[in-house]
Image (tube, rainbow, N blue to C red):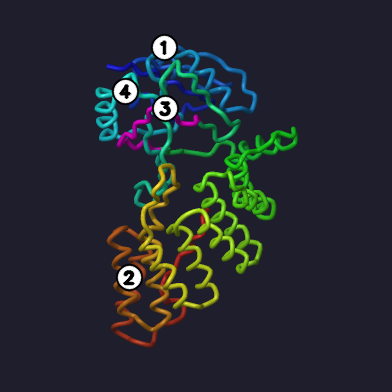
Amino acid sequence: MATISLCMIVKDEEDVLERCLTQAKELADEIIIVDTGSQDRTKEIAGRFADRVEDFVWRDDFAAARNAAFELATGDFCMWLDADDVIPEEERKKFLEVKRRLGLDTDIVIMDYAAGFGPDGKPDFIYPRERLIRRGRGFLWKGRVHEAIEPRGKILRAPVVIEHRKKQVKDPDRNLRIYQKMEEEGEELDARSRLYYGRELYYHNQYKKAGELLESVIRDGKAWKEYRVEASLMAAYCAGFLGDPERAMDLLFDSFSADLPRPEICCEAGRLWMEKREYRKAVFWYEEALRCPKPEEEGAFVREEYKGYIPWLQLCVCWDHLGEHEKARQCNEKAGEIRPQSSQVAYNREYFRNLALDYGNIPEKEKISEINSTCN
């Protein structure tokens, strides 16, 4: 059976590290922890699980730290996790089955990474990541922020989902600071870096500069189509916050030059039409979101709620405004099938009950609940 070295970089992770290592210890034959400057009990906790705990002087470069951890590995494959990652029991069973069958001719094992979760706790933002990397094949992490290894060789797609469940955000400005430093130092940013830099700026409400960076990705003919689609969506959000919905719509449509329509793109187009009270046009785009095929290419960003819950709930709102109350009620029930515990679905059910009892006499404050589907 192939051997696996778990290689982690950590800093001040005493609140989550034991949770992660308790779940991961049965998967790895060797655990290596590289600490980048912890001031809490992180190294003490790591010492209870790890075969090696080493220090690394932090220099605003995640790739450098991960490469340092990988260099210490002795197993056939290197595996990475973040300290706040979780591997549920069922996924651990799947992982062990993959490990049992794993051949040494494999170069990269791809597993899904769940990085966002709905109110019910279920993953709703999932994308594939390189998870196991064959040692000794010259693979290197690249990128000072949002580091990655470019897959090549024989690639195995494994049906395992690892969940990124943060308990707290310790330094929300860290990534932005690193990108700004890269820019100040004159480092050339590739399309991936510009996309993630633009997203960081967006999350910090710096919409103008974010939009400029994201639009540069859209215009980059060499950029991977998934980056162009994501940049179109994020740039449209920026234009909306800057008060230019027409530009936002144009940016959404730019994504169609990269690939087929995506649910997120269609939902944002629907939301823009809803803001104009053009409900029939909004209906078209929300229904289109429901019809969107699954992206053909591996690696697409997938936001599950945009494939069903959001369009059904927004269709409920649109049909209600158009006076088609039974259609609206049915759409709300469709949303409820996806999220049975949704407070918005429950609110709307009460609204429809009141409507049936006292049609036409519902106070404005009791009107149906809609959601703002813009990324946050």
Disc 1 target residue: 74
Q: Is residue 354 above or below residue 140?
A: below
Q: Secondary structure at mark 2?
A: helix
The residue mark sitting in front, 4 or 3, is 3
Disc 3 target residue: 153
The residue sitting at 41% across, 58% down in the picture is: 306
Q: Earlier in the sequence, mark 3 or mark 1?
A: 1
Q: Is residue 333 above or below residue 125?
A: below
Residue type (three-letter) at the residue carrying disc 4: Leu
Residue type (three-letter) at the residue carrying disc 3: Gly
Percent position of residue 31, x then y: 40, 17
Q: Is residue 38 above or below residue 346?
A: above
Q: Which span is picked out in magenta?
A: 149-163
Q: Earlier in the sequence, mark 1 or mark 4?
A: 4
The residue mark sitting in front, 1 or 4, is 1
The residue sitting at 36% across, 60% down in the picture is: 309
Q: In the drawing, does residue 181 fall left or right of residue 299?
A: right
Compare residues 291 and 348 and report the one nearer the observer. Answer: 291
